[in-house]
Image (spheres, rainbow, N blue to C red):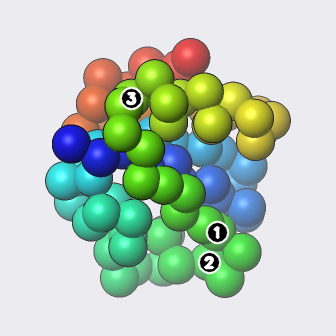
């Protein structure tokens, strides 16, 4: 399984997703205004959850967490 990091520029949040998540769609996202801000970005794929979480921390955003839909939703 692949993991991806969603970096939201507009609200300074970062979420780690499983590639199969309906919000992630293997790093392509979904077609909605919430996930389509021009400065928002998907990073990955990462081979493990730990790799994705480590990368997510390097973005230094105010809120970093796992996706609450496909993962446990916990901050790390």
What is the CA distance from the residue labelled 3 to the residue labelled 2? 25 Å
Asked if the residue at tag 2 contacts the one at tag 3, i.e. Cβ–Cβ closer than 8 Å, the answer is no
In the rendered structure, the answer to whether residue 5 lies left or right of residue 22 reads right
Q: Which residue is mark 1?
A: 40
Q: Residue at x 76, y 42 (%)?
A: 59
In the rendered structure, the answer to whether residue 63 lies left or right of residue 62 reads left
Residue 10: tell me if it is visible: yes
Circle 1 sits in a helix, a strand or a loop, which is it? loop
What is the CA distance from the residue labelled 3 to the residue labelled 1? 21 Å
Q: Residue at x 53, y 63 (%)?
A: 42
Q: Which residue is mark 2?
A: 37
In the picture, the quarter occupied by the N terminus is top left
Which of the two discs, 3 and 1, labels the residue nearer the N terminus?
A: 1
Circle 3 sits in a helix, a strand or a loop, which is it? helix
* Image coords of residue 76 (percent x, y): 56, 17
Q: Residue at x 36, y 39 (%)?
A: 47
Asked if the residue at tag 2 contacts the one at tag 1, i.e. Cβ–Cβ closer than 8 Å, the answer is yes
Residue reaching furthest to the front:
47
Q: Which residue is mark 3?
A: 49
Q: Residue at x 46, y 23 (%)?
A: 50
* Image coords of residue 62 (percent x, y): 76, 34
Circle 2 sits in a helix, a strand or a loop, which is it? loop
Residue 23: tell me if it is visible: no
Decide which of 32, 19 is in the foreground and name it.
19
Which of the two discs, 3 and 2, labels the residue nearer the N terminus?
A: 2
Query: Does 59 sit above or below residue 34?
Result: above
């Amino acid at each position: 399984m692949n993991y991806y990091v969603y970096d939201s520029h507009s609200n300074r949040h970062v979420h780690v997703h499983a590639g199969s998540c309906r919000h992630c769609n293997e790093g392509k996202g979904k077609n909605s205004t919430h996930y389509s801000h021009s400065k928002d970005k998907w990073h990955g794929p990462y081979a493990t959850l730990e790799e994705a979480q480590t990368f997510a921390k390097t973005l230094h955003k105010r809120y970093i967490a796992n996706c609450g839909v496909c993962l446990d939703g916990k901050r790390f």
